[in-house]
Image (cartoon, rainbow, N blue to C red):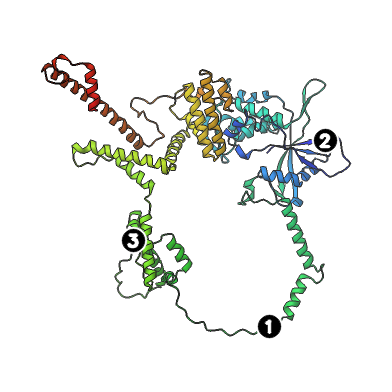
Amino acid sequence: MPMIIEEMDEEPMSTAFAFHYLADAQFSSFQNPEIQPFFEKWGFGADMAMCTFRVEQKVTSESFQEMLDAFFKDREVLSVLHASTGVRVISPSKVAVQWQPMSTKVVSMSFFNKLEDAGCISSSGHIRGRLEEDWEDVPIVNMIREAMLMEESELYETFSPEDRREFLFRIFQHLVFGGASNQYEDHVEDYFKATKAVYKDLLSVRRNDTGDVEVLSTVASVESLSDGGVLYRKERDGVDSDERMEPEKFEEVQSGIAKLLSLQEGKDGAGFATAAEEHLRDTPKSSPKPKQKTRSVNPPPGLAKLRAYPGLDPTIVAAARQAGVPSTHLEAMAGALKVGPGKLDDFPKSAAAAPPLFLTEDEEEEVADPEPNTGDPVTDALVTLTQIVKNMNKKPDSKASLEDALDQVGSNAASGSGDVSTSMGRKHAAARRALHKAFMEDPAQIWRSIESNMSQDFNLQTAMPNATSAFSARGWCEHRSKIQPYIRTCRWVWGIAGILDDLRLNLVDRARARAGLLLAAAEQESLDHGSFLLSQEFLMEPAVPVSNFQNHHLPEPVEMATTRLLDPRWIEAFADRLKQLDAYVEMRKKLNIKSRGSLATNQDLGGKGKWAKGKWKKGAVGETDASET
């Protein structure tokens, strides 16, 4: 997490360091609408933060260590760090910052021309890929990563040890490797653009007498806080990231411990240990009380039912019965605990058939509730009525019913060859009704199936060079879909995919904001007679990479020309609806032809009616068709 500590111009008389958080500080990279989408695409998201603090005292090279120690002990600083980052300071008195100075000699992006000289990138900026390989749990998917991380590679010598201590190199390396859900770039321009913006935000520069740029800031790479705290969540060894020790609570704990120590040492009157010993010594030993005989009381009917399984705890039995565990399972477990090692005989005994401990789902549905036998007729009647009402109100599993209906789509079983079409039509109709019901009552089944198919299709490319491993809707649209490079289609697909990615990340507010901006952009495009210049600004993100959609190819003639996002059974059920409509329209055409043919025959025969005696007209046919319809 980058932090900027600014010095004040005047030097106060106090020697203690005091820090102030500048909450209104503005950055040209972080939260910038042009750069922030890159951070989110590269997997940083909410884990990335930039903070600016001001120190009142003048900081010199001799007092830099003292300033860092005071920084991570300051109450205002800790409150900001605990709220915005994963830094946790548990014991401020034990904080001893371990850090390394970073070099700031490089002030030009031409420093990275070494990547092109080493063959990591082409002259156009394209990042050359390689076969994916894990190096210290980091995926090496391109030549830039190999040059930066793999010490055994020849490309590692592209940057010298002095180059790797440069602050500009550290920023570029951090952005290239990204976060856990990184969507890698194929070209290096975006990495350079973000690196330059971050570098300008974190450093103060000026022109010297010769006109060259000179860096005034001192950069420290903090590596550890010693025993006082941790810098990253992974260092906390299982400690929940939400557990925080606020400075006020820490002082209360310290004061409580100091008070206990003072009592133990006898500073406040009689010592704690001495007072306890005198109390135990002066207290007379009490004689043991005789045991009283308790009167046996019959347990209530419900408790007797819970104690019907010897060897099992009644509370566990109650929880098991409430969870729906059949009584046969409980009896088998109680019997297994009750039966001890038997005596060996000369011949083995015939084993009695025991009920199975575990049943399949179909067998569990067939198991009926046990008949109540508590000894109390009223209790038995209430239990029986409760079981009847429960079975009456039991709702069918919508997921199971949907799967059953879809499974019937692929089945061609029918009573006869002539009934196949009718039978399949009914099954397709039942599948469509089940899908519509799931869409209205349990839509999670719909989007889970679609996202599962999208993820499976997206992961087919992980074995390819320079392929991303983090699944996202936009990544699928850009790299795996068959969407053709029609500019209007790509724009709206890109926006819809962004909404889906926000919902998958539980960013509901941003998803709703993106949906509203898309509607506003659509209306503005219509007002501008199809021009998308102003509408693109509404979306507050970079334009859709249409060039990547040009690599999409339509399916071959031997391939299925259907989307891979939907279950094939869904598509078959929807296509059957079109077949029925087409058959209905064709049948109507044939009926109209037959109707007109019969009317012409009636005219030729001189039949009586309004078509008799040559008075047949085309309009009359239309009236007859409408009346028949």
Give the number of the disc on residue 205: none
Give the number of the disc on residue 8: 2
Question: Which of the pair 391/167 is nearer the observer?
Answer: 391
The quarter holding residue 168 reads: top right
Q: Earlier in the sequence, mark 3 or mark 2?
A: 2
Query: Residue at label 1?
Result: 285
Residue 207, placed above or below residue 47: above
Q: Is residue 519 left or right of residue 88?
A: left
**Mark pair 3, 1: CA separation:** 60 Å
**Mark pair 3, 2: CA separation:** 80 Å
Question: Which of the pair 164/466 is nearer the observer?
Answer: 466
Quarter of the C terminus within the rendering: top left
Q: Position of residue 53 (x, y in %)?
A: 75, 38
Amino acid type of the residue that numbered disc 3 sits on in the rendered structure: Ala
Quarter of the N terminus within the rendering: top right
Give the number of the disc on residue 368: 3
Name the residue rendered at 34%, 40% in the picture.
433
Amino acid type of the residue that numbered disc 1 sits on in the rendered structure: Lys
Amino acid type of the residue that numbered disc 2 sits on in the rendered structure: Met
